[in-house]
Image (cartoon, rainbow, N blue to C red):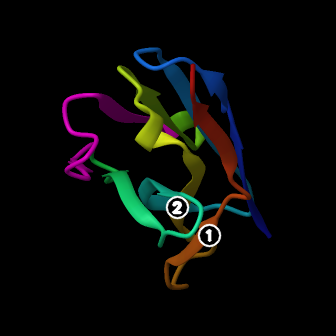
C-alpha cells in the first residue's frame, strides 16, 4: 500500500501565503513525477504544478510566478509554496505521485485525500 497525506491547508487573506506538504509512505521503491492539482466547487480538477524526479517543474498558467513546487526525495515529500494568494485560488488541493513499488513493476499514480485552501477576507 501507498499513502499520500497532505497538510498545510487553511484560511488565508488575499495576498497571503501558505505552504502545502504531501508525504508519501508505504511500499515505495521509487517515485517519479509528483504534482499538485486543485478542484474548486462546480469546476473540473486542474493542474497546479508538477515536478519530475530530477527537479524539472511545470506550472498551470494561473499560478505561474506565484506558486513554487519543490520536493525532498529523501523524505518522499512534495511541497507547494503559494504566495500572493487570490480568492480564485480557493479549492481543494490534491497531490499525486507516480510510484514504483517493486523492481520491474510499472509506475502507478496515487492520490492524496485533499486539503482545503480558502482565500477570503
Q: Position of residue 109 (x, y in %)?
A: 55, 74
Residue receiving disc 1: 110
Where residue 67 appears, x then y in whole percent? 33, 32
How far is disc 1 from disc 2 in space, using C-alphas?
5 Å
Assess whether mark 2 and mark 1 are in contact (beta carbons under 8 angstroms).
yes
User: Which residue: 68% across, 43% down?
Assistant: 116
What span is colored magenta in the figure?
Answer: 55-73
| Quadrant in the picture for the C terminus | top right
* Point 49% across, 34% down: residue: 79
User: Which residue is identified by label 2?
Assistant: 97
The structure residue drawn at horizontal position 55% and vertical position 67%, both measured from the top left corner, is 99
84 lies left or right of 74: left
Q: Quadrant of the N terminus?
A: bottom right
* Residue 13 point in image, percent of width and height: 54, 17
* Mark 2 surroundings within 10 Å by alpha-carbon count, few (fewer than 14), some (14 through 19), many (20 or more): many
Give the residue displayed 47% in from the left and 17% down from the top. Answer: 17
Nearer to the camera, 1 or 19? 19
Q: Earlier in the sequence, mark 1 or mark 2?
A: 2
Q: Secondary structure at mark 1?
A: strand
Amino acid at each position: 500500500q501507498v499513502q499520500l497525506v497532505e497538510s498545510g491547508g487553511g484560511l488565508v487573506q488575499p495576498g497571503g501565503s501558505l505552504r502545502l506538504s504531501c508525504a508519501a509512505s508505504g511500499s515505495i521503491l521509487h517515485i517519479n513525477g509528483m504534482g499538485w492539482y486543485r478542484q474548486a466547487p462546480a469546476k473540473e480538477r486542474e493542474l497546479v504544478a508538477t515536478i519530475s524526479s530530477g527537479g524539472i517543474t511545470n506550472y498551470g498558467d494561473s499560478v505561474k510566478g506565484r506558486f513554487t513546487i519543490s520536493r525532498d526525495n529523501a523524505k518522499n515529500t512534495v511541497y507547494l509554496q503559494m504566495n500572493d494568494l487570490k480568492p480564485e485560488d480557493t479549492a481543494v488541493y490534491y497531490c499525486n505521485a507516480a510510484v514504483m513499488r517493486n523492481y520491474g513493476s510499472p509506475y502507478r499514480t496515487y492520490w492524496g485525500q485533499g486539503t482545503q485552501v480558502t482565500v477570503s477576507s
